Image (tube, rainbow, N blue to C red):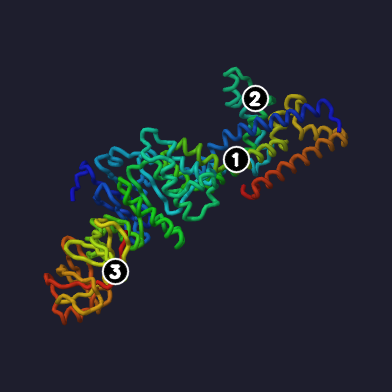
Amino acid sequence: MNTNPLNNQHITACFKLKRKEFQLDVSFTTPGKGVTALFGPSGSGKTTLLRCIAGLENPDRARFFINGQCWHDENKNLAVHRRPIAYVFQEPSLFPHLNVRENMAYGWRRIPKQQRKLRFDDVSAWLGLEAFLERKTEELSGGQRQRVAIARALLTSPELLLMDEPLASLDVNGKAEILPYLESLCQQLDIPIFYVSHSPEEVQQLADHLILLEQGHVTGAGDLNALLTDPELAIAHFEEAAAVLEARVVNHDKEFHLTSLAFDGAQVSVSYNGLPLGHKARLRICARDVSLALVEPQQISISNSFAVRVVSLDPDRDPSQLLVRCEVGGQHLLSRITRRSVHLLKIKIGDLLYAQVKSVALMK
Amino acid sequence: MEFSQLDLQAIWLTIRLASVTTLLLLCVATPLAWWLANTRWRYRQVVNALVALPLVLPPTVLGFYLLLVLGPKGWIGQLTESLGIGVLPFTFSGLVIGSVIYSLPFAVQPIQNAFLTIGRRPLEVAATLRASPWDRFLSVALPLAKPGLITGAVLGFAHTLGEFGVVLMIGGNIPGQTQVLSMAIYDHVEAYEYGAAHRLAAGMLGFSFIVLLTLYWRTSQRPLERL
């Protein structure tokens, strides 16, 4: 990882901030494009870090470079309204004295015409807000309000999008309503995104890179697949611990209603979905759904199996279980199996085995 | 109802005084309330207490000190004299200054509460949407504090209408120049003109009631309780 702050296409950050009962002391570098998730338990400093990046906090020491530009260091501290950011807060925080259109236009009117990369009508159409433009904000549902907040933020044509648990204040319906927008947003926007979350599912679905925070410190930073499967990190030991793998659609089987996806020489099938051949998709494989076999499994109902190499064996939370990290090409996945099985099968690091996957979820 | 020439003068003077005072109050109280709502200065409570003083002081105390400070021997009096304005006691300008100070807490406190109720979030949102600090104040803080501004203005106006002690000390009781309604009523009572006193007093009672009723109706809140 290149830590030169002047290197293009990188974001480097370093913040120190002391409060009465809380201390933030972070330093990391992350690629200057794609979605970087800030993940950690509540109170770990995710929101404070995001606010530091936006310039909303006054850290004792700060350094923030994005794709070659300095926003904050010893000599410079760009005021919040001069940073080309968009911030989506946990609550929609719409202005109550303005209607939907005026809310959306608030930031849009404040940037010079030549800097407007997105058209007002396109954004309102894309977020499905055309019918609500003249409404008062209090007439909208929670999900609709958060859509307005996202539209309002995007209309400033930002160079960095900051999202602070945008789903947290919504009920199940609201979450289901917003998530598809966030997904396509993350895929289509050509700007880096920081996404704060404490939900492993959201991270697995949206993130490309991951920064793990605990008690104000970075405990891990890097590529999503590598971090999710790193047995040193707490996230690999969650009940719902899972690996996320990038795959491509290679085949449709109409007869059995299946779609095949390939990654690094391995292939799995999921329920038929009609995605075009060659489409890039993200697969989620839970550690508890992966079992290991010494020989290529035959005559069993699980059809998703492929060759893997054992990279590490680590104790899990439950003392009867072990967490086995396996490699397929360049990507990793986790398998949670019993200590007894490891003993009986004499599994050790470097072994070539067959992973049988009971269930694969297609994320996007 | 018939009013004498002097009574009409007093009514007109009172309305003029209350209007000018209210305008000035808004200009002074709004920035002061904004500062009080946002500052973390450790001595801000001193300023809060100073602003609230007219709530508890007898108006004559306030009027007495204003008379001293604004008079020919007071430092403001000497300043105004050296500037060629003359001394302010017993003039309309003197009345306005006294009224602004006397009604200040009635305007500052509702506006300050309104700013505090808004909280930091809407202003932070505006900052992330490229609004400069001044822009944020005008486009977010002021519109959101509108109920507080209206309450402050109405209370300041109504309170100025009813003042007596400060005006008597600093303005004297010069008909046509500094004689306001409350003093006209007092003069009528002194002269046993109860009928004339009644007409003015009942008018003020009715007017004040209607002003407060409108205020409660409009804001559906309890402005006096928020003080």
In 3D space, how far apart are the residues under numbered discs 1 and 2 (Cα atoms)?
29 Å
Query: Is A120 situated left or right of B221 in this image?
Result: left
Tell me the tag on residue A255: 3
What residue does disc 2 label?
B88
Which image quadrant for residue B74?
A: top right
The residue tagged with tag 1: helix, strand or loop? helix
B134 over A328 or under it: above or below: above
**Mark whose residue sits in front, 1 or 2:** 1
Question: Who's the residue at 84% across and 30% down the image?
Answer: B3
Q: Chain of mark 1?
A: B
In 3D space, how far apart are the residues under numbered discs 3 and 2 (Cα atoms)?
99 Å
Q: Are marks 1 and 2 on the same chain?
A: yes
The residue tagged with tag 2: helix, strand or loop? loop
Q: Nearer the viewer, residue A354 or B86?
A: A354
Tell me the tag on residue B149: 1
Q: Locate residue A24, reporting x and y percent.
A: 32, 54
In 3D space, how far apart are the residues under numbered discs 1 and 3 (Cα atoms)?
72 Å
Amino acid tagged 3: Glu
Which image quadrant for residue B145?
A: top right
**Mark whose residue sits in front, 1 or 3:** 3
Q: Locate residue B209, reporting x and y percent.
A: 75, 43
Would you say the residues marked 1 and 2 are in contact, meaning their CB atoms lie under 8 Å apart?
A: no
Amino acid tagged 2: Leu
Q: Locate residue A96, reporting x and y percent.
A: 53, 46
Query: Is A231 situated left or right of A180 in this image?
Result: left
B194 over A356 or under it: above or below: above
